[in-house]
Image (cartoon, rainbow, N blue to C red):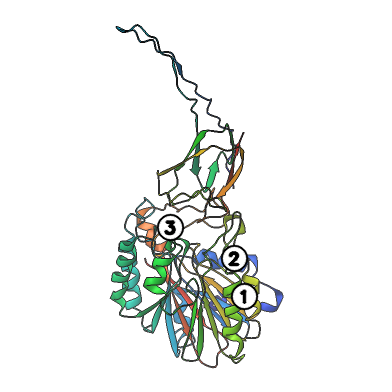
Amino acid sequence: MTKKVKDEILHDHNAGGIDRRGFLKCMAWAGTGALCVMQGGVLKSYSLSRLSDLGASAATAGELSFVQISDSHMGFNKPANPDVAGTLKAAVDKINALSNAPEFLLHTGDISHLSKPEEFENVDQILKGTSKEVFFVPGEHDVLNDDGAQFRERYGKGAKGAGWYSFEKKGVHFIGLVNVMNLKAGGLGTLGHEQLEWLEDDVKHLKHSTPIVVFAHIPLWAVYPEWGWGTEDSAQALAYLKKFGSVTVLNGHIHQTMQKVEGNVTFHTAASTAFPQPQPGKADSPGPMKVPAEQLRSVLGITDVNYVRGQHALAVVDSSLA
Amino acid sequence: MRRGVWILELAAPVVVAAALLVSGSRGFAASVEQAQTSSAEVKIDNFSFGPAALTVAAGTTVTWTNRDDIPHTVVSEDKVLKSKVLDTDEKFSFTFTKPGTYGYFCSIHPKMTGKVVVQ
């Protein structure tokens, strides 16, 4: 194996999931930035430091580019990060500095920490600094005390049910799902019957070749059910997406980047812009992980997603705020 | 990922009985017995209720205190218990008047569950 391909992870999706070594390699890059490209069912992952080796490939050229941000937790002020507004502003600066300007942003929830109006307002004001349209789905912190009424009023106009919706951009079908409502004791995230029926109907008439991007707050795969990091009825949702050749699922909630490929589906979680959380099972609880102040921005980040027409899948690039 | 073993914390019922003798010009005596009161505490630490199972006598007031950096709630599925969101160090109290088993959870982090058995 030459030096050039040493850091590359090749994975045959038919073998069922990225291997442990590959997974650990991806995890090692969490925070420092990783580029993951899925082409023809093979996931290739590169550290961001080697981006130059890729030249003008999928990572740098495309017809549709957008950015995912997540877990701003505006209002959080504990030692893990006493200035979440400052780190969100750093994320905005990072977005504005991207060489391939994104067309819009997705925010995958936990916009606020305590669902306070001023917290939402503060995030909206900071994100105006990107001059981009932002599509939101709620996290559990955005629907406290009022079953999400305030969230729907602010971000969910025209959305269905608790705030789910879909839209098209340049031939890519985007689906925003809500899995933080009506949670049951002992359970995980939930989509619910009404939303699943809507989803089935929403994708029924789409061509199998349509690239699909699903975004929701809690991961739609079982990252670590012991900490509630999964969604009870996500298998049903994914069953409706089986016919499509390219499905990308973008989530937040776990405040760290992680990815997995299963058949036609690439799962990806984004870093938080506020504070990191521990790796699954590596702490007593999933509470905020305290890191030295000078390291904080290296474990926060944004995710840049790039779609190239004719290619099998989307390129997903995580970069830290450092 | 529960740390160690929770010790069942039972606040001993505090019975305050006071006899008050009032003597005055009319020379009558009155006896006042204060009603039985008791209380118990549940601490929320590391995304866990401690103790997760608590047994109390009817009439006991249970107070939950959130000691995590992350907000939690205390809610039962039938909504008999329904706290507002508790940020760090905020408390929620509920007086259990009827015997029974009251299961509850954190509606934000539903893996967090607990119960109060009222005798």
Q: Which amino acid does label 3 sit on?
A: Asn
Q: Name the residue under label 3.
A: A145
Q: Which mark is residue A237?
A: 1
Look at the numbered disc 3 and give the secondary structure of its residue.
loop
Residue A14 as seen in the image, left or right of residue A230 = right
Q: Mark 2 points at which residue?
A: A231
Look at the numbered disc 1 and give the secondary structure of its residue.
helix
Q: Residues within 10 Å of mark 3 (few under 14, many from 20)?
A: some
Q: What residue type is labelled 2?
A: Thr
The image quadrant of residue A200 is bottom right
| Residue plotted at (59% across, 54% down) | A185
Q: In this view, does A122 lie above or below A44?
A: above
Pair 3/2: label in front: 3
- Residue extending farthest right: A15
Q: Can residue A12 be seen in this snapshot?
A: no
- Residue extending farthest front: B26
Q: Nearer the viewer, residue B92 or A129?
A: B92
| Residue plotted at (50% across, 73% down) | A161
Tell me, yes or no, whether the two marked residues, 2 and 1, touch with CB atoms within 8 Å. Answer: yes
Which of the image's four quarters has the N terminus of chain A?
A: bottom right
Q: What residue type is labelled 1?
A: Ala
